[in-house]
Image (spheres, coloured by chain):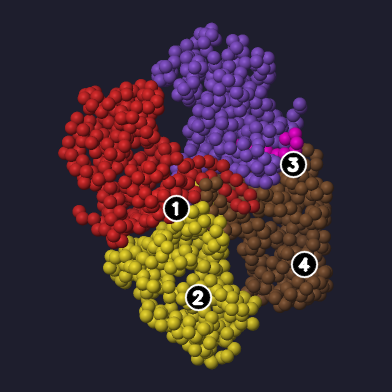
Chain colours: A red, B brown, C purple, D yellow
């Protein structure tokens, strides 16, 4: 049985705690959150976990792995402590809002040799896994270009926007990670434009709500990303991979199979709007992968360097938007 | 050059006249309609045709074929005259509202040996042709059962209802023909129910607006037909052929590729509502087939007996509905 | 906390046991199965239940409800015992393969006044619930006719076929129940045809694998049901409700959002083939409804009489097929 | 009756000649092509036109308009002659491969005051017209960003590539025109990348086969264009307009309504692959618009300046690709 400690009992920490508790190979030993709440106590009861503080977790030799789903500003420090304590880590993105800290943290972790994975849950979505397999086995031919469309149904609260690190680091990072993952190679140039077109309050908070990113890979293939903080349709999460023999696409997940037809047309449902629901299966599979990583060393679909590289692209996108120039990545 | 005479200059006669005129192998020599009209004169000008009466047509040895798209009560008589005059015929359904007349007319025609085809235009729809080919070449395996859905967008005028011969003979007959055509064998039993659920005036006129028909073929396979004089969606024309290796379907033809998405859902267009538009290509192909039938004897996809057999099924459906019993066809 | 006993630890009994255990208001006190197995012991451990015999359950005053998912021949007897013991029941269909026994059992239950519901899980499917709501609130206008298509991906084993009570009682019964539910009124006539077109072994076992059923309701509206034990596409579960103002449809649930396009066309995924997965949410909602029925008396979407009435239609369908006549139901 | 002369009897010239001949308000008086051919003679017969040379056309005061669908290198000169002769012009893109010539030609035309329109036929596609209307009437809210996907089914012959002016001027120009048209404002910056990923022979000819373009409009809205000379799926012609209240999309036009389902999935048809078929209706509407422009002065959906502005964007895209920089357009 793998003993885990979950840091953070917010929205995503709750998902991880429940998935870990439901996993037959895992045990949620500790829940840690600087802010104690009724919700936390309730969650501790449901998962048969102990409410503890950080030191208790790292002092307990029986804890095999930690899940970092606490606030972003705590990630780097917890990662370093985990490295020192020799505990496996699962970490939500981003590693740090400060890219230099991200780099030094990743270097520490890699030197420590601990097992770790990043919370890019989309890689664990069953459709994205099937897509990746078809790309890998050659059926589709070679990739020529990729289109990605990720739109949120509604913008997050301004308070969230302010501490999010900005749209590229908060939202686009998932697409940037997916671009590297699907292409199977690194990116050479980044071009990004963005604007605040939907909600003036986002602009007042110094952020954008609409972004278009173009990536060129080292071998000369292309990725176009279209991001938006709000879609009139709902949570859009689509990808189209144009290959020499096939065009592979993943569409939106609709919340219902019911269609309504009248003389105006045929109306099918809007998407499942809550990302926690949309990716429910992915979060379960991610936890299972973390358990297997700890138990058997089976590599996860992500590692800590994927967090660094996706952030490198997000940082480049921000620079491109601010300078109005194409950013060439040095390697 | 094939010289044709078109009987009837109404909606469908106009379509045939224009298609014949546009066909490089055909010439519209005469237009015949007991009711002269500006429309007829206009049509004669467009098609470079002469406005004539029935006798002129049959007395002209240069007329190779006649197209019967006049009112239903004239069909049988024109067919018999064509048989006597040795002219090829293309005839719109039904042959006669009186089934005994239909039988004797078909017998006369078959004895005369003239070339003839029925106006079941759906057989000439490109998608139905592809469907039939796939069924014939064995790719799909053998047919197990067929579902057919045919709904009109709006009921016809009551005046039309009254002289139509009733819903089975006017509307269902196309599905009954298609059932025989796709199955490639004859029908053994017919069960039908019907009701007036949409428009009380149709009931007052002694007709129904909703009908469900079940056919059993001689070899024991099934067809379910769902008909309605009005659909809230529009002109629905669908078929689903369930085979041992594949399920083949033809959906509605939409009038637009534009979709509109918002938080209510994603709305695609309603169908092309006018059957003349929906089957525009079929009518052209039908005329081409008639020309080839006359020129080279190439059999059309329909012959006059198909008109008889489809009507036999429509008559059986009416009997089943009235008696509340399954009708077994004698052969 | 509601204490439950689960009878039967097969495929569906396992689903109910796990759903009950996961329900915060329920407790699985006993598992009962005449055949003890490792699977049962494992399930008892997972659900913290006691492996017990029938008498223990009925003797325990702390058991509030029983779930009957044991073999069909045990249903009626367990229902009667539950009635005597005053325990609420959830019963899988059918009540008994013998219709007279079904009738007498339902009468006993209704006299006893115990709370009970039938396992017609499709009523709890979220899309069918939305459909029913839209029909009830009048937005769609009034129902004119309904088409239902239910096809299994693969036929069940012949051993299952032999004790299933036949295709109408085993498979069509779900559509027959749904027909009554959606129409909101009773059925007046039943017409059914069936054949063994897919698998000769099913015919040898005295059953059919393809069935077409037509229902006429008391008010003169229609239902067409198309059933098959095997579809080349997979598990098809569709319905189309043709109303005066709207046409409402529920399509198949596909197992993937990935599409693959090449010059042959665009291929989307086949359906989720396992009914336990397809209706996973329904089974959870059903268990929740049973808990609420016991706790608060909130009526479930089904009661024991729905089991009787659906079976009445299945029996009539069988009679219609065997006699070649329309069966009129007496009321 | 409007008398027209058609320059060029190739693929697109033939379409225009036939559409003009079928138009009840128009008469094809002359066909002009430096290379006489059997096809031209045949076409002259079908359209009742005279095979003539350039001078005859411009000397004939009865010619009201000319259609320029000859080889690109002849466009500018014919336009200037039309301006001098005071004849209305319909001109296929591009005006000239040399942008300076394009600019001076457009200036000449505008000074001459003759009526003219450009052959951007996509503006006349019925779905794009409906889209534009919905954008104009405010139902959809304001545009935030636009995605355009245009892919050819197969690359053109290398001989065509060599005299095409390159991918941006030959293919992307239609999307660049559509971007301006839908946005209803001019473009401020252009970023483009391209590569030869599909067919090395295209690269050897100095051209690319894959291009990604990003446009920023003066008011700060975005357009992403994805172009390719070959798609494994076929002729893809899609657009998605993300507005504040709605997301509007136009999908591919499929060549068939037949779908084929088996355990591998459900396969619908590939697109209509020949652009002449895909836009058949547009070409007819375009010719009708030209006739109305001449007859009544009703402005067409395009004018000669649209040809200039679209080319300006194509030239900027080429510069951006070659320099690796964002090109800012001066105005």
Secondary structure category for the residue under label 2: loop
**Circles 1 and 3: CB atoms closer than 8 Å:** no
Nearer the camera: disc 3 or disc 2: 2
For the image, the number of numbered tags is 4
Q: Which chain letter matches label 2? A: D
In this view of the protein, can residue D136 be seen by the observer? yes
Quarter assignment of residue C195: top right
**Mark 1 vs mark 4, CA separation in Å:** 60 Å
C18 displayed left or right of B37: left
Q: Is residue C222 magenta?
A: yes
C102 displayed left or right of B112: left
CA neighbours of label 3 inside 10 A, class few (<14), some (14 to 19), many (20+): many
User: Going 56% across and 29% down the picture, which residue do you hit?
Assistant: C121
Residue closer to the observer: D74 or A206: A206
Q: Are marks 3 and 2 on the same chain?
A: no
Per the rendering, the mark at residue B193 is 3
Q: Percent x, y for residue D251?
A: 50, 57
Question: Compared with residue C95, is residue B131 higher up or lower down, i.e. above or below?
Answer: below
Q: Which residue is mark 4?
A: B8
User: Going 58% across and 80% down the picture, which residue do you hit?
Assistant: D294
Per the rendering, the mark at residue D303 is 2
**Mark 1 vs mark 2, CA separation in Å:** 33 Å
**Mark 4 vs mark 3, CA separation in Å:** 34 Å
Q: Which chain letter matches label 1? A: A
Q: Which residue is mark 1?
A: A198
Question: Compared with residue C256, is residue B78 higher up or lower down, i.e. above or below?
Answer: below
């Amino acid at each position: 049985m793998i003993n885990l400690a979950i840091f953070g009992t917010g929205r995503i920490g709750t998902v991880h705690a429940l998935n870990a508790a439901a996993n037959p190979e895992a045990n949620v030993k500790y829940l840690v959150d600087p802010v104690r709440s009724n919700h936390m106590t309730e969650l501790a009861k449901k998962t048969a976990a102990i409410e503890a503080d950080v030191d208790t977790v790292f002092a307990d030799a029986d804890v095999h792995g930690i899940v970092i789903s606490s606030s972003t500003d705590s990630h780097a420090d917890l990662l370093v402590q985990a490295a020192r304590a020799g505990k496996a880590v699962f970490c939500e993105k981003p590693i740090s809002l400060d890219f230099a800290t991200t780099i030094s943290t990743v270097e520490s972790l890699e030197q420590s040799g601990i097992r770790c994975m990043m919370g890019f849950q989309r890689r664990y979505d069953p459709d994205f896994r099937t897509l990746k397999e078809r790309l890998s086995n050659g059926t589709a031919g070679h990739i020529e270009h990729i289109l990605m469309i990720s739109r949120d149904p509604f913008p997050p609260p301004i308070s969230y926007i302010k501490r999010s690190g900005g749209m590229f680091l908060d939202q686009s990072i998932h697409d940037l990670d997916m671009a590297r993952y699907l292409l199977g190679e690194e990116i050479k140039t980044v071009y990004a434009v963005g604007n605040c077109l939907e909600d003036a309050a986002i602009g007042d908070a110094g952020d954008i709500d609409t972004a278009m990113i173009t990536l060129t890979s080292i071998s000369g293939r292309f990725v176009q990303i279209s991001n938006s903080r709000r879609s009139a349709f709902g949570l859009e999460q689509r990808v189209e991979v144009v290959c020499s023999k096939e065009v592979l696409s993943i569409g939106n997940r609709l919340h219902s199979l019911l269609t309504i037809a009248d003389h105006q047309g045929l109306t099918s449902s809007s998407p499942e709007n809550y990302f926690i629901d949309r990716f429910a299966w992915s979060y379960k599979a991610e936890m299972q992968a973390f358990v297997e990583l700890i138990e058997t060393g089976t590599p996860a679909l992500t590692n800590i360097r994927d967090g660094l590289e996706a952030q490198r692209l997000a940082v480049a996108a921000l620079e491109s938007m601010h300078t109005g120039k194409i950013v060439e990545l040095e390697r």
